[in-house]
Image (tube, grey):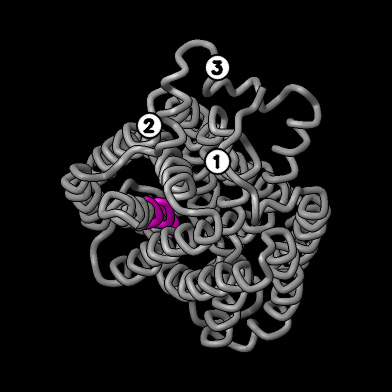
Amino acid sequence: MTRGTLLAVLVAALGYFVDLFDLVLFSIVRIPSLKALGITDPEQLTLVGKRLLDIQLVGMLLGGIAFGMLGDRLGRLKTLFGSILLYSVANILNAFVTEVWQYEVLRFVAGFGLAGELGAGITLVAELLPTAKRGIGTTIVATIGLSGAVAAGLVGTEVAWNHCYLIGGIMGLALLALRVGVVESGLFTRVQAHGSGISRGNPLQLLWPPRRFLRFAAVVFSAMPIWFVGGVMFVFGPEIGKAMGIAEPIMPAKVILWAYLGVVVGDVASGLISQFLRSRTRTIMGFQALLAASIVLFFAIAPRGPEAFYGMMCLVGAATGYWAIFVTTASEQFGTNLRATAATSAPNFVRAMAVPITSIWLAMKPGMGTVQATLTLGICCVAVGMVAALAMDETFHRDLDYLER
């Protein structure tokens, strides 16, 4: 463990901290920021908020593909710091929007930039660390990173919405000072030295041959339940609480705070369990089963009041804590010449799935009601995720020094 390796883990972790701070910030400031732009109708707050979230997620999907390609062509480090720079600047500009269209443009740019940090960071850490320690390194990155969402929840309760964006942007720019001393992946530099003889960062390789496409699809769908929770239950917690008949308004910042406290605990637990079981897939399936049970418990207990609502949201968050193991698995499933493309695009394909998921949820609400629609859709998403996890290869012991042909 050289100084450069340790610094790479630190930078990847802090970069993901700022990444998550911004990613969940919109969920926290959605209502006050839109009210400041003149939108006050409750229905419009939901619909415009969903549109802005969709735009951000589409930006992340496109950014995931673009930064993934760059990660395999230009290097993990350049991609990591380029991503941090882009989303930090976009974050700062978000503080000064005066029209909804400006907000839409900047959420797209922020999403595009946010897409690159996690995949590049996880790929770098996974390739620098020895096989037996990969899970520990990536768990450290994800745990510190997910704490950024907790920080956003705390800041969002005390600071004006536009100042929250400024804080996130300034933190990201400050992080760029750590770029000196971080080492590039030795696996990448060896592949790069082969020159043009090896195809690097071609996203079409994820689509062909069919077995490779099915491998990528299984990775993506295994994490889909996480973003059902993140895109519906976390974002629209106030609407769900109201539909449950809870008299006191549910506060978005408190939802994020308690939910991501649970996510951090679950993330640490999933990393440790993965190391103990020496298995990624069994860990993922265990957490999926816990997620199904926690969603059912949420709708049984949360209607009792705000405290029960936030507490159960924390439990549901903990059950989604296999995100770090999912991203680690995504990086391990593919060769060095395609690893950053897969590890960067897979999380953003998962996040982008919140677009159709929330659309289905909104379509189900009028006929089934908010509570029943959320419960039914959640169980369906978990079922799909478990089938996908069954189809994945076990990669705990896999040597990452190989190529995709």
**Which span of residues is magenta-colored?**
19-27
Q: Nearer the viewer, residue 191 or 227?
A: 191
Could you tell me the amino acid type at mark 1? Ala
Could you tell me the amino acid type at mark 2? Val
Within 10 angstroms of label 3, few (less than 14), some, or many (20 or more) residues?
Answer: some
Residue at x 42%, y 59% (from the top left corner): 141
Q: Nearer the viewer, residue 360 or 129?
A: 129
Residue 88 location, quadrant: top left
Within 10 angstroms of label 1, few (less than 14), some, or many (20 or more) residues?
Answer: many
Q: Nearer the viewer, residue 132 or 175?
A: 132
| Mark pair 2, 1: CA separation | 26 Å
SS at mark 1 in the image: helix
Position of the C terminus by quadrant:
top right
Within 10 angstroms of label 2, few (less than 14), some, or many (20 or more) residues?
Answer: some
Q: Nearer the viewer, residue 38 or 209?
A: 209
Q: Position of residue 344 (x, y in %)?
A: 51, 38
Q: Which mark is residue 105?
A: 2
Position of 212 with respect to 170 (left or right) is: right
Q: Which mark is residue 204?
A: none
- Provide the residue designation for mark 1: 343
SS at mark 3 in the image: loop
Looking at the image, tell me whether mark 3 or mark 1 is earlier in sequence order: 3
Position of 133 with respect to 353 (left or right) is: left
| Mark pair 3, 1: CA separation | 19 Å
| Mark pair 2, 3: CA separation | 37 Å
